[in-house]
Amino acid sequence: MFKAFLIKYAEIGVKGKNRYLFEDALVNQIKYALKKCDGTFQVRKTQGRIYVDALSEFDFDETVEHLKRVFGISGICPVVYVEDEGFEKLCEDVISYIDKVYPDKNKTFKVQSRRARKNYPKDSMTINMDLGEAILNAYPEMHVDVHEPDIMLNIEVREKIYIYSETIPGPGGMPVGTGGKAMLLLSGGIDSPVAGYMIAKRGVKLDAVYFNAPPYTSERAKQKVIDLAKIVSRYTGPIYLHIINFTDIQLYIYEKCPHEELTIIMRRYMMRIAERIAQETECLGLVTGESIGQVASQTMHSLVATNEVCELPVYRPLIGFDKLDIVDVSEKIGTYETSILPYEDCCTIFVAKHPVTKPSLKVIRRHEENLAEKIDEMVEEAIRTDELIIVSES
Ligand code: ATP
Ligand code: MG
C-alpha cells in the first residue's frame, strides 16, 4: 500500500547555504543506501522535503532497514498517495487508510493538511474539518485531540494527494559528506569499527588504514578487516582502505627496543604512518578505537605517548565507554559477529608479557633512537607499498 517515504531530518546547520549541502549529501547517501534494495526508487528534493518514491514493487521492510542506516535522517514516514478524484473519494481513501494502519480504532487523532497545490478547491482549514468529520462518522470510537493526538494524520495536496501518519525513527546524526574526511585506524577488533561508525554519524567521511603483518597474521585476518570495512560502509558510503605492510617495522622494533615498550612504540609508528597517509589524502584527523584504561597501551600515560607523534587531531569517540557499551553498539551496527572471529592481529602476536602501563616519554624517545639507522627508510617503504582497496556495500 505504501508507495513512497517522506524523509524527515532534524538537527543541523540546515541554515542558509548549508541547507543545500546538507540536503544534497542526504540525497546522495539515500541513493547509495537504496542501491542494494530490490526495486527502483527515485529520490527527490522538493520544497524543503525529501521524498523517496518507489517506481516499482519493493520490499517494505528491507527498504526501511536500509533507510535506517542513513545518518541525517531523523524520521521515515511511509506515504500512501492517491489520485485527486474529488473530496468524496479522498474521504474514502483516508478512511480505508486508517482501517489498514490502525486496526484498533480506540485512538485520538488530528488531521493536519498542507495545500501545496493552491488550485485545490478547499483550503487547509476546511480540509482538516471536513476530513475530521468524515472520519468521526466512519469510526465513532475515534476522537479528535488537537493537542496530543495518538494519530497525526498528515494530508498533503500536491499533484497527487499524500497521506501519512507514522514515523519510523531514523539514526539521527548528519549526512556523511557534510563534515570533511578522517582516517580511521581499523583493526580486526570490536572497537575501531564502532569508533568509525560514531565519527561518520557526525557527517564525516571515512578512509581507513590497516596495519598488516604477514606472515605473522594470515590472509584471513586481512579479509576480516575488509569485511568489517564493508559493514561500516553500509553507513558511510565507499571506504578507501589502505593496507600497510607493517612486518619489517615490527620485527625491527622487536629487535631493537625493550619488549615491554613494544606495543607503545609500535602504536607510535602506526600513528605516524596513518598521519602521513591522512595528509596525502586530505583527511583532517585520525580516528582510533581507544578507551581509557582498556589495555596497557590505553592508560592516560600511554595515550600521551601515542598522541605525541601526531599533529592532526586524534578522535577517540570511545574514550569514556565501557567495553560492554561498545559491544552493544557493535551488535547494533552489525560488526560484532565479524569482530569476534578469532584471527590473530599484529598487536597480539608481538605483545609483551608485562607491557608498561606508565611509559615515560623520555625513555620511549630514547629507545626509539635505537631505530635511527633504518626506520625512516622502512616507513617510506611501507607507505610506498600501500595496497589500496575501495570497499563498498554496493
Ligand atoms: P580494537 O578492538 O579496535 O582492535 P583494541 O581494544 O584491540 O581495539 P588496541 O589493539 O590497543 O585496542 O588498538 C587500539 C587502537 O589502535 C584500535 O582501536 C585501532 O584504532 C588501532 N589499531 C590497533 N591495531 C591496529 C592495526 N593492526 N591496524 C590499524 N589500526 C590498529
Ligand atoms: Mg585490537
Image (cartoon, rainbow, N blue to C red):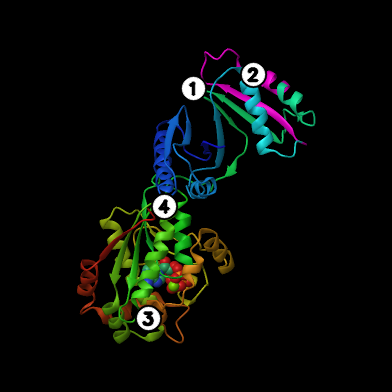
Relative to 141, 222 lies left or right: left
SS at mark 1? loop
Q: Earlier in the sequence, mark 1 or mark 3?
A: 1
Q: Earlier in the sequence, mark 2 or mark 4?
A: 2
Residue 276 in the image: state x and y as whole percent.
28, 62
Range of the magenta residues? 106-133
Q: Identify residue for label 4.
A: 236
Q: Identify residue for label 1.
A: 159
Looking at the picture, which amino acid does disc 1 mark?
Glu
CA separation in Å, label 1 and label 3: 67 Å
Answer with the quadrant where ligand 1 appears in the image. bottom left
Looking at the picture, which amino acid does disc 4 mark?
Thr
Residue 137 in the image: state x and y as whole percent.
76, 23
In magenta stretch: residue 119: yes
Q: Residue at x 47, y 45 (%)?
A: 174
Q: Identify residue for label 2.
A: 88
